[in-house]
Each structure stands twice: as C-alpha cells, then as structure tokens.
Image (cartoon, rainbow, N blue to C red):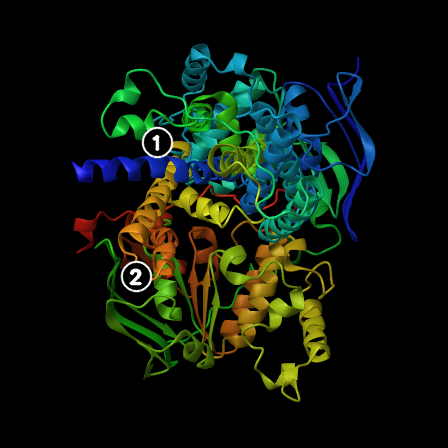
C-alpha cells in the first residue's frame, strides 16, 4: 500500500511539474511547424509568469492574472516574430536575445511592482478542481483528476492543437509553410501572416507555462523562476516528433523525472541532493540521444523565407 | 479589342545585375508562346514577375484591358496566373491531394474538391498515385501534380519553366499532349525552353530574350530555326554558323597512348545490400574521351564517386597512370591530378554564398600562387580569377560577385574552370551540360575537348546521348551497374545503344 501512495504522489507531481514544460513544448511545436524556431520559450515563460503575478496582484483575480499572462506572451511572441520574419535575423540568436531581454526585464519590473522584499508578494491563484467520481478513484484519482484548471486546459489545448494542425485546412497551410514556404506562397498561402500567427500563439502558450508556475504552484513571482523549463521544452519538441500530443507526452515524461528526483531527495537524504537535481536534465539528454536520432524536423524550420531570394 | 494580356515596359534589377529591361508583350487566350533565350537571358525572371514572386521596378501588366497589380503569388492566383517551376514547388512530406489543396479557401476543400481533382486527372489522362508522398514520386508524376495544382485553381495563364528538362524521353510526348489540350481549352500558355525542336512542335509564337531584353516575338511556323537561334545568341557566333569545331571534330587516335585510368572489377554494394556497381571494368587512355551513356540511375553517379574517392568500392581496384589509388584519400587523388565536375553544381560543385574568385580558389587555397607569406593573398586570388573569368567568358565579369548571383551556365563555367586546371591526368565530368543552353553547352564541350587534346584522359558521364556520341572517342554503355558494351560513336546506331542501355539484368551476363 505504501507503494501505491508513493505512486500516486509521483503521478500528481508529474502532472504538476510537467504542465509548464508541456505548455512551452506545445508552443514550440506550433512555431516550428510554421518554420520558426522559438528559442525564446524560456523568456516567454518568465513574461507569462510576471504578467500573471502582476494581474492577480493588482486585481486579486486569478482569471485576470491568466489574461495578463497570455497578453505578455503574445507580445513577446510577436517581438520574436518581427525579428525572425521581417528582419530575418538568425532565429537562434534572436531567441537567445529575447531570453536575455525578458530575464532582465521581468526581474526589473517585478521589483517595481512588488517592491524589493524577499519572497515577493503573494497573489491569488487557482485551486484544484475535483472532477466528480473520477477524483475518488484510487491512485490516479487524486493525482490526475483533482488538478488545477490549467492542467485540464493543457489537455484540451493539446487535443485542439493536434486536431487543428493535422486535420484542418489552415493547419495544412501552416505545415506547408514549415516544410516549403515557397511552395506554400505559390499556392496562395499568406506565408508571413501564418508565421506571425504561429509565433504569437507559440508565445502565448509558453506564457501559460509561466502562468501555471505562479497561479497554480507557488503563488508568487520569483526572478528566473522558469529555471530551464523552456530549454527542456525544446528537447520535448524533438522527442515528441513535432506532434502536439507527442510533445505533451515527452514533457510529462520530464515532469515525471522531476517528481521522482524530489521523492528521492526525501527518501535518500544521505546522497547530496544536487545529484538528484541533475536527473530531469540527464533524462532529456539521454532521451534525445536514444530516441532523437530518427526525428525529422519540418524541412524549412529556421530558414527565413525571402520571396525575392535567387 | 484589347488583348488578353498586355505587358508594357517591365524592368527589374537585382543590385547591379539588370535582369529585365523594358519588356513588352501582347498575348491572347488559347495561345502558346514559347520564351526562348540563353541561361540568364531573363526568361524565369520575367515569369516570376508575372506570378508576383518578384516586384518589377517599372512597367505595367494589364489583364483584359484593366491594369492589375500582382503583388504576391496569392494575387496572381486570384487573377488566374499560375506557374510550374523547373524544380517544382511541392511539399515533399505531403501527398498529392494535400499539395493541391494547400492555400485554398476552406470552401474549395471539401469532398467535391477531391472528386474534382480526380476528374481533372482523368480528363487529362494523368497518371497520379494519390496514396504516396511527393518525395516518393518519380519526376514526371511530380510535374503532373504541379499541373493539377494549377488546373484546380482555374488558371487562364500558365507558365511552364523548362518543363521537359526534368522528364524522361518517354514522358515528354504525353506531357506535350496535355499542354496542347490546355491551349485548346483557351488557356494562355508560356513555355520557357531553349530546345528549338520542342518550341517548333508546341508553340504558336516565340518570344526571344537576350540579356534581359525582348529581341523579337515571331510566329513559329514561318520563322526558320536559324533565325530564332541567331536572335537568341546575338552577335556571338554559334557552332552552326561557324561550322567549327562541332562539325569537323577531330577524333584523337589514342590507341597507342598509355592508360590514364584503369578500373578493374569494381563492385559497390550499398548498405541496403543492393549491388550498385557489379564487376565494372573500364579503361580511359591518356588524351581520350570515354563517354558513359546510360539511363539515369544505373550507377553512373556512383562510378564517378568511386573514382574520385567520395565512395569506397566494396571490391576491385582503380589505377591512375599505373599506380594503384584504390584506397587513396580524396585529397591525394586531387594531388595526383584528378579533376571532377560533379552532377549537382549547386550542392557539390560550388559554395553559392562565396564569391566567384573564392569558388575558383578553394580546394587549391594552399597553392603557392594563392599564398603570400603564409597567408591567403586576396590580390593574387583576384588576379588569377580575373584571368579565368575572361578566359571562360563568365558573366557578369566580376569575380567578387557571389556565385549564387550567376546563371546556371556561368556557374558551370566556374566549376569547369577550376577542375580543368586541376586535371593533370584525369578529368571526370558528370552531366556537365545539364540545364545549359546551346551556347554554354558548346563552350563546355569545347573546353573538355581541349583538355583531352592536351593529353588528359576524360571520363564523360551523361544521360544526354547526343552529347555523349558527339564528344566521345569511345562510348561505354552502362546498365544496372555494369558496362553492357563499348561502341565506336562513328559506327553505331541509336538502336544498338538503346538496346545496350535497356539490357535486362539477366541478358547482361
């Protein structure tokens, strides 16, 4: 029975810790399917987190916090889009620049908004929702069916994104842009508009990761609280084969590793905890090496499209 | 009545390069107009302006009497203008249907759309496999998908950019039949080509372009081919008008010359276990041009790669001037005087983002002539390149220009110039005239002849049989990774070679 309790705990931890990575990975999938690298996921998580904290702090409403977070994500996504699509700068460099900008900007703004006191200001967040009957199930009930609303939003968005991308006409157009923008252009797809749409949505999804960190996990904004989740999300994209569902599964796998290492820290206090902290990162590295080799990215990802290029 | 299409005063420059200069054209529906010109004459640029890929610097396009602004390909589609590019613009990872439906409004993508695609397919007798992805399709089928894509968008103007250059000989006739049907249905078809016989067969009028200008728009039926060709070439004498050296070509007597290259019993088995080369044996004598004829994909490319060291043979030996080089590195083979003009000049022959002079120098960059005090001498590089550019008539004559800014023919000249200089003992050329116009082809052929005359052995691999027969001293025919026969190009018939080229594997033995 002890084992079942432990399993339930780890499962609950997986959902909680994996959700932010999954949101960011989903955002990355949308961008890369449209031919754009979103290396700025990490910074966009911070933007979303700050927006959520500020919105909730100012109004006391978690929903308004959610809205503010999404708006911050959209803006940061469009900024990256402007650099990648219009200015055609190297997308890796643009993404890294955005990460550095947002890391500094969010730290600065958080001090302006919340004051410099340690721990920041506590804000109102979401509480867990118990789904009737399902949440009473043993083991999976408390872990998967009594989560906060953002977890359910994630599942809904993942399915919607998969359906849109793989089954809808506009999804086909976006995939065509990511594979061969010239072919899409010649077929009448508004390439640049599709790309702006993709990168804005991508930023908003990454921001949801930050929203979840603030409003569902710690109820406070902390500098650098994204803690590499945006980069692990990049690995989840590859591991998930550029599929929304696949990326979510990969992200939850990384969440699982994180949950396990937390448990191990408690159960094995004699081992330095730093070793356990490595675990999720090690897992992402190993998973990429073992499973990532066969992956095939959208053919034109990262290559800026220039109609008059000869 | 206003003409259907009225183009006036179109100009377009790319930096310093003037691609189009004051282009005018009147055209009506149900007409097929060929656009004839050398590589770099502005044919594709003109087409790209019509479909909104390039914005003209000047000029006006009128459709049915009303001026239109074709600011994007999407706008072009609205106006019923479509284009089929030489190298296609399909999404490889998707199937035919998805490729055709990309970009259309949702209302046009329902179940009726699928039915209409198949209807169009049977109307035009097109054989298209709807279950496979584009990457798995043969070239001819890809082209049919492209045409279906245009037809599905109800084009009234269709531009075909060198459509037959990618097709197998057997695919050309059905393709031309389809084009004729389009024209009969009232479509205005532009047929970009530099093959005069094809133009004669398909076009009503021919628009001859040269250096970005329209030299004339002439009715095909009453214009002699010689006149078209003269217009296309301008003042430059063609081989037909001069009669030399193509007509009275000198065949070298190399029977007593030493062997430059000996390939003996070479086998190449790919990782999948397929036998790409089987017990292949051939000899190239010094000063001889040995042609390799054959249908594409019978091991010719791999043979060139084995000889130049890009691939290692599974068994067998290769000797250069009597010295075994079977396991020598690429660098040492280059040092031994092997020059190589690869099939794909964009991917393997050139670094497009480097300048002409850098492309001419690289791989030889350690040579003393490019060095000064242990560092690269830019000045020496520039001077040497300027000489080469002049000698090979590379245009525009600016060695500092990026290789990507040049037309295909001029790019090929860069590769050829570099490799000819390197080929002291052996020159291996693969498809050296692919996609080149008449003038550039002659130039390339003459350069290769000159190399052979200087005592270098030449292995000339091409799928263009006429060229192989024209240039070679001896012709070896390849099929299924073997040499199926060696013939004398003077005393052989096309039928004989055709039989050797298609020899079934069991007959080969």
Q: Nearer the viewer, residue A93 or B340?
A: A93
Q: Position of residue A110 (x, y in %)?
A: 66, 43
Callout 1: chain = B
Residue drawn where x is 45% and y is 24% of the image: A149
Q: Is residue B360 left or right of residue B479?
A: right
In this figure, which residue is indicated by the disc labeled 2? Answer: A271
Callout 2: chain = A
Quadrant that contains the C terminus of chain B: bottom left
Q: Which residue ends up furthest to the bottom in the rendered image? A: B373
Q: Which of the 4 quarters of the picture holds residue B489?
A: bottom left
Q: Is residue B147 above or below residue B209?
A: above
Q: Is residue A111 left or right of residue A22?
A: right
* Residue A19: numbered disc: none
Q: Nearer the viewer, residue A102 or B5?
A: A102
Mark 2, Cα crowd under 10 Å, few <14 / some 14-19 / many 20+, is few
Q: Is residue A233 left or right of residue A239?
A: right
Residue drawn where x is 65% and y is 25% of the image: A59
Q: Position of residue A275 (x, y in %)?
A: 35, 60
Total of numbered circles in the picture?
Answer: 2
Q: Is residue A191 visible?
A: no
- Per the image, label 2 sits on a secondary structure element best described as loop
In this figure, which residue is indicated by the disc labeled 1? Answer: B132
Q: Position of residue A295 (x, y in %)?
A: 37, 46
Q: In front of the other: label 2 or label 1?
A: 2
Q: Which residue ends up furthest to the front in the rendered image? A: A117
Q: Nearer the viewer, residue B216 or A45?
A: A45
Q: Which of the 4 quarters of the picture holds residue A111?
A: top right
Q: Is residue B262 above or below residue B82?
A: below
Q: CA distance from mark 2 to mark 1?
A: 55 Å
Quadrant that contains the N terminus of chain B: top right
């Amino acid at each position: 029975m002890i084992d079942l309790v432990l399993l339930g705990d780890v499962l609950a931890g997986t959902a909680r810790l994996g959700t932010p990575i999954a949101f960011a990975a989903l955002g990355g999938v949308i961008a890369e399917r449209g031919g754009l690298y979103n290396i700025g996921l990490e910074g966009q998580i911070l933007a979303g987190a700050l927006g959520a904290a500020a919105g909730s702090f100012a109004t006391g409403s978690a929903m308004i916090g959610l809205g503010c977070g999404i708006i911050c994500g959209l803006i940061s996504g469009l900024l990256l889009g402007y650099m990648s699509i219009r200015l055609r700068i190297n997308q890796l460099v643009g993404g890294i620049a955005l990460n550095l900008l947002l890391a500094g900007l969010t730290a600065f703004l958080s001090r302006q908004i919340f004051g410099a006191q340690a721990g920041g200001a506590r804000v109102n967040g979401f509480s867990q929702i118990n789904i009737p009957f399902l949440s009473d199930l043993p083991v999976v009930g408390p872990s998967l069916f009594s989560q906060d609303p953002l977890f359910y939003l994630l599942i809904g968005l993942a399915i919607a994104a998969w359906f849109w991308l793989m089954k809808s006409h506009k999804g086909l157009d976006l995939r065509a842009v990511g594979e061969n923008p010239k072919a899409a252009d010649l077929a009448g797809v508004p390439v640049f508009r599709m790309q702006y749409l993709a990168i804005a949505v991508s930023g908003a999804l990454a921001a949801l990761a930050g929203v979840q960190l603030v409003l569902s996990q710690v109820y406070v904004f902390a500098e650098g609280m994204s803690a590499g989740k945006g980069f692990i999300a990049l690995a989840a994209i590859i591991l998930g084969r550029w599929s929304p569902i696949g990326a979510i599964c990969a992200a939850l796998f990384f969440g699982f590793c994180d949950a396990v290492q937390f448990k191990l820290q408690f159960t094995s206090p004699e081992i330095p905890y730093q070793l356990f902290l490595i675990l999720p990162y090690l897992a992402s590295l190993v998973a990429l090496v073992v499973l990532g080799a066969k992956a095939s990215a959208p053919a034109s990802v990262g290559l800026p499209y220039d109609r008059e290029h000869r | 009545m206003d003409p259907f299409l009225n183009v006036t005063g179109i100009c377009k420059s790319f930096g310093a390069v003037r691609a189009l200069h004051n282009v005018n054209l009147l055209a009506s529906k149900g007409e097929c107009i060929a656009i004839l010109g050398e590589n770099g004459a502005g044919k594709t640029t003109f087409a790209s302006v019509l479909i909104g890929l390039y914005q003209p610097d000047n000029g006006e396009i009128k459709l049915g009497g009303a001026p239109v602004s074709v600011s994007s390909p999407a706008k072009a589609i609205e106006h019923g203008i479509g284009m089929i590019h030489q190298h296609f613009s399909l999404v490889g990872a998707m199937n035919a249907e998805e490729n055709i439906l990309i970009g259309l409004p949702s209302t046009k993508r329902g179940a009726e759309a699928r039915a209409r695609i198949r209807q169009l397919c049977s109307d035009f007798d097109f054989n298209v496999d709807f279950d496979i992805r584009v990457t798995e399709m043969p070239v001819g089928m890809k082209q049919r998908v492209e045409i279906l894509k245009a037809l599905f968008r109800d084009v009234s103007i269709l531009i075909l950019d060198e459509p037959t250059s990618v097709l197998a000989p057997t695919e050309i006739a059905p393709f031309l039949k389809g084009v004729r049907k389009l024209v009969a249905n009232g479509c205005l078809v532009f047929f970009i080509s530099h093959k005069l016989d094809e133009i004669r067969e398909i076009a009503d009028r021919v628009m001859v372009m040269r250096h970005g200008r329209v030299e004339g728009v002439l009715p095909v039926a009453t214009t002699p081919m010689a006149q078209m060709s003269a217009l296309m070439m301008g003042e430059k004498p063609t081989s037909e008008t001069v009669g030399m050296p193509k007509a009275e070509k000198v065949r070298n007597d190399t029977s007593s010359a030493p062997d430059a290259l000996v390939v003996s019993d070479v086998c190449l088995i790919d990782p999948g276990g397929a036998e790409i080369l089987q017990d292949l044996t051939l000899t190239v004598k010094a000063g001889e041009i040995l042609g390799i004829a054959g249908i594409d994909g019978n091991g010719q490319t791999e043979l060139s790669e084995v000889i130049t060291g890009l691939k290692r043979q599974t068994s067998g030996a290769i000797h250069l001037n009597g010295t075994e080089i079977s396991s020598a590195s690429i660098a040492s083979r280059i040092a031994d005087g092997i020059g190589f003009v690869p099939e794909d000049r964009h991917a393997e022959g050139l670094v497009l983002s480097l300048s002409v002079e850098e492309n001419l120098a690289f791989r030889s960059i350690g040579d003393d002539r490019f060095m000064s005090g242990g560092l690269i001498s830019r000045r020496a590089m520039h001077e040497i390149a300027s000489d080469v550019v002049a000698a090979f008539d590379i245009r525009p004559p600016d060695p500092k220009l990026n290789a990507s800014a040049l037309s295909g023919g001029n790019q090929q000249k860069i590769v050829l110039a570099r490799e000819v200089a390197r080929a002291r003992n052996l020159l291996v050329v693969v498809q050296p005239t692919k996609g080149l116009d008449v003038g550039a082809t002659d130039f390339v052929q003459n350069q290769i002849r000159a190399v052979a005359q200087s005592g270098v052995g030449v292995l000339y691999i091409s799928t263009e049989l006429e060229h192989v027969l024209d240039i070679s001293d001896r012709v070896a025919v390849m099929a299924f990774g073997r040499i199926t026969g060696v013939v004398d190009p003077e005393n052989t018939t096309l039928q004989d070679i055709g039989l050797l080229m298609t020899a079934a594997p069991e007959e080969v033995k």
